[in-house]
Amino acid sequence: MQRTLILLKPDAVQRRLVGDIIGRFERKGLRLVGLKLVAATRELAEKHYAVHKGKPFYESLLSFLTSGPTVALVWEGREAVTVGRNLMGVTDGAKAPPGTVRGDYALSVQNNLVHGSDSAENAAIEIALWFKTEELVSFTATDANWIG
Ligand code: DAT
Ligand code: MG
């Protein structure tokens, strides 16, 4: 069992795609264990994208993430990190295949609607950045025998 942090970035909220994107993760079978609307501060954005510090797009990326509300989600399930990445599609919306969030709705590289943790280790770090322990609610899904 694994957890992953998924962010619906400010473009997803502005474009009213929150319900659509959450629905895809729900229907896949992941369990929602954390959900909130966050106005990310510069400090939070810097920590979240620390790995990209110094890259040419870094400042623009921080402006984007702090430009409006973000929906922060934690999903739990088998292979949640890989499943999340697959539901999102590759970084560049122009290259992401149809059927993925980015493939269906994004054309941009930067404004690509979603963030998803890229490893279980980074998921743990990112979840701790966006959520307090008591904001996460673990539960047994009543359809667990069907979903796996
Ligand atoms: P991902 O979000 O698919 O994990 P990443 O971690 O490499 O991609 O980069 C984080 C975000 O930074 C990405 O969602 C969009 C932005 N980004 C990445 N490469 C970029 C580039 N070459 N130009 C502009 N923005 C970029
Ligand atoms: Mg990344």
Image (cartoon, rainbow, N blue to C red):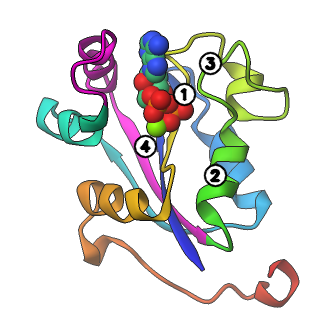
**Which amino acid lies under the numbered mark 1 shown in the image of this protein?**
Leu
Q: Nearer the viewer, residue 73 or 126?
A: 126
Does ligand 1 reach within 8 Å of label 3's beta carbon? Answer: yes
Range covered by the magenta-colored residues: 52-76
Residue 1 position within the rendered picture, expressed as x and y whole percent measured from the top left: 60, 80
Residue at the disc numbered 2: 84
Q: Could you tell which of marks 3 and 4 lies nearer the N-terminus?
A: 4
Say which quarter of the image contains residue 96: top right
Q: Residue at x 51, y 68 (%)?
A: 3
Residue at the disc numbered 4: 71
Gap between marks 3 and 4, in whole Å? Answer: 21 Å
**Which amino acid lies under the numbered mark 3 shown in the image of this protein?**
Asp
Residue 7 position within the rendered picture, expressed as x and y whole percent measured from the top left: 46, 43
Gap between marks 1 and 3, in whole Å? Answer: 11 Å
Gap between marks 1 and 4, in whole Å? Answer: 11 Å
Residue at the disc numbered 3: 92
**Which amino acid lies under the numbered mark 2 shown in the image of this protein?**
Gly
Q: Could you tell which of marks 2 and 4 lies nearer the N-terminus?
A: 4
Relative placement, left or right, of 136 versus 40 is right
Decide whether residue 35 is among the magenta residues: no
Q: Nearer the viewer, mark 1 or mark 4?
A: 1
Q: Secondary structure at mark 1?
A: loop
Q: Secondary structure at mark 4?
A: strand
Residue at the disc numbered 1: 113
Say which quarter of the image contains residue 105: top right
Gap between marks 3 and 2, in whole Å? Answer: 16 Å
